[in-house]
Image (cartoon, helix red, strand yellow):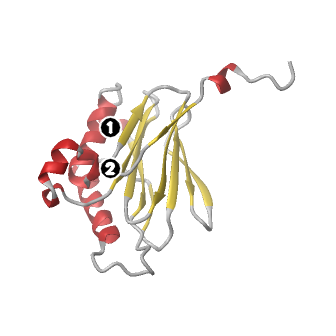
Amino acid sequence: MSGAPSAQGIFKQNAIVGVGEIAVSNNSGVTISTYALGSCISVVAYDSVAKAGGLIHIMLPESHLSPAKAATQPAMFADTGVPLLLQSLIGLNAERRRIRSFVAGGASIINGSDMFKIGERNIIAVKKVVNALAIPVPKADVGGVNNRTVHLEIETGIVTLKTANKHSTINLA
């Protein structure tokens, strides 16, 4: 029947990750997305064998900046959020040695200057955590002055990155 939706199309779902939030899935019909990453930073992680992936939208570099907030919303901080992302994927049968990730964000979007340098500090903090956890990051798109939007397709491990000037894809599978 022409124009009829496919079964796959009917069951497609989009999970939106807001600031300080995390989402993981092993459902092939799910795309996980986050929008308008400015100084915030996103870590996208994927295990191609388990077909499990996740995305976190980190707002601040270190949880000691607000211990009470870190206790209730650990995904807000790089030092507590990235380990949470990894642990959540392991809970979906992902294996640490197979996980590949992509990092985006950390811009300085306030007229090109940010006196607190949150974007830069977020980049440094995420690099420190992913290195400590030995998570390979084959590709990153960080810094600069542009907002970024990121989508992860669980079925394929394809990450789509959108900015005002470019649209690119990264294959984590």
Q: Nearer the viewer, mark 1 or mark 2?
A: 2
Which of the 4 quarters of the picture holds residue 25?
Answer: top left
Q: Alpha-carbon neighbours of circle 2 within 10 Å: few (<14), some, or many (≥20)?
A: many
User: Does dot 2 land on a helix, a strand or a loop?
Assistant: loop
Residue type, label 1: Arg
Question: Which of the two residues, 114 or 151, is positioned nearer the viewer here?
Answer: 114
Looking at the picture, tell me which residue is in the foreground, 19 or 150: 19
* Above or below for 150 versus 29: below
Helix, strand or loop at mark 1: helix
Q: Residue at x 27, y 68 (%)?
A: 121
Q: CA distance from mark 1 to mark 2?
A: 26 Å
Asked whether disc 1 touches disc 2, contact meaning CB atoms under 8 Å apart, the reply is: no
Foreground residue, 125 or 101?
125
Residue 130 percent across, percent down from the top left: 28, 52
In this picture, is 59 found above or below 45? below
Disc 1 or 2, which lies upstream in sequence?
A: 2
In the picture of the structure, the residue carrying the numbered disc 2 is 20
* Residue 89 figure quarter: top left
Left or right placement of residue 69 versus residue 19 in this view: left
Residue 116 screen position, x and y as percent: 27, 76
Left or right placement of residue 6 versus residue 93 in this view: right
Q: Residue at x 27, y 60 (%)?
A: 60
- Rendered location of residue 119, percent (x, y): 34, 68
The image quadrant where one finds the N terminus is top right
Few, some or many residues within 10 Å of mark 1 (<14, 14–19, 20+): few
Image point 13% across, 49% down: which residue?
Answer: 68
Which residue, given by chain and number where applicable, does mark 1 sit on?
A: 97
Under mark 2, the amino acid is Gly
Q: Residue at x 31, y 47 (%)?
A: 135
Specify whether 90 is left or right of 29. left
Residue 90 placed where, x, y %?
30, 30
Q: Is residue 128 left or right of residue 50?
A: left
